[in-house]
Image (cartoon, rainbow, N blue to C red):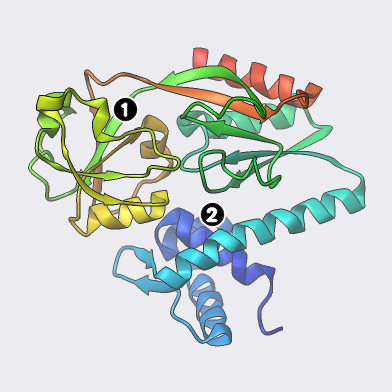
Amino acid sequence: MAWELRHIRTLVAIAEGGSLTDAAISLGVSQAQVSRTLKALEQAWGVNLVRRGSREAALTAQGRQAVRRGRHLLMLAEQLEADSRGLERLRLGYAWAAVGRHTQALQRTWAEQQSQVALSLVRGSGPLAGLAEGLVDVAIVRTPPPPGRFDSALVGVERRVAGFPAEDQWAARRRIRMADFAGRPLLVDTRAGTTTPALWPEAQRPEFAAEVDSVDAWLDAITAGVGIGVSAEATAHQHQRAGVLYRVISDAPPVEVRLVWHRGEHSDAIAALQRLLTELYAR
């Protein structure tokens, strides 16, 4: 094949960083190398995967699809290596954001306390971030899991934030209130999102603008001026993008953060992860 895993890893890094510069930083390479690798992948497939701008890079429709499949491919490659080396691995899935500002502390503390088990953060899709499909062992969710097949534990709560274009009328404000959304166009993810117009009293409800299926599509729609969004605070910590501002919604109900696993599979590693996440959110 004319492409390799390093090409996929570069494309995923661009999607998560929002620019070639941030992708280069996360990969530990030069921006020129990221650009060359991306161009080689696009030439090999004969498609345009990323729209390059002066300060940011946005995925095309083909790029978004490739990133979704590419993340699964990278996860399977990591699992193959771990199995071959006899390592125990715990795959933690998330759909929009992992655990926000606690993500770095989670990875660092886990490596110090649980060195015998490798923790992998896997960005998935859908309400259970790949758990139902067996792509991960446990998942962070912000909507209640369906009863029957899964167990869950509350590990913390997060504030809700508004996301809007940098040129929006809210740009000069420090905080937003629920009543401020009345009549404004709202972007909604009905599968894995935490917010729908039903969150507001009828007289204060925003208008439905469009449905999105991922945080990347949500950010794209905000920068394009299609609508504004509401998400958990973790999104603001993990998905900074030029042209998008975040503000805390001062009177919004908090978002519950839950750890979910298959019923009957609460292993020692999952129990240790549950304790660590609870401690981090308690801080």
Image coordinates for residue 281, horizontal then vertical, percent: 51, 18
In the displayed structure image, the side of residue 219 where residue 74 appears, left or right:
right
The residue tagged 1 is: 160
Dot 1 or dot 2, earlier in sequence: 2
Q: Residues within 10 Å of mark 2 (few under 14, many from 20)?
A: some
The residue closer to the viewer here, 243 or 218, is: 218
Q: Amino acid at mark 1?
A: Arg
Q: Is label 2 in a helix, a strand or a loop?
A: helix
The residue under the point 46% across, 72% down is: 62
Q: Nearer the viewer, mark 1 or mark 2?
A: 1
Q: Are marks 1 and 2 in contact (CB under 8 Å)?
A: no
The image quarter containing residue 136 is top right
In the rendered structure, which amino acid carries the disc numbered 2? Ser
User: Is residue 81 found left or right of 230 in the rendered image?
Assistant: right
Examine the rendered structure and indicate whether residue 159 appears above or below residue 225. Answer: above
- Identify whether 58 is placed above or below 202: below
Mark identifier at residue 26: 2
Closer to us: 37 or 161: 161
Q: Residue at x 45, y 55 (%)?
A: 17
Question: Residue 171 at x, y = what percent?
Answer: 13, 41
Asked whether 165 or 31 is in front, the reply is 165
**Is residue 181 left or right of 241 when viewed as pictured?**
left
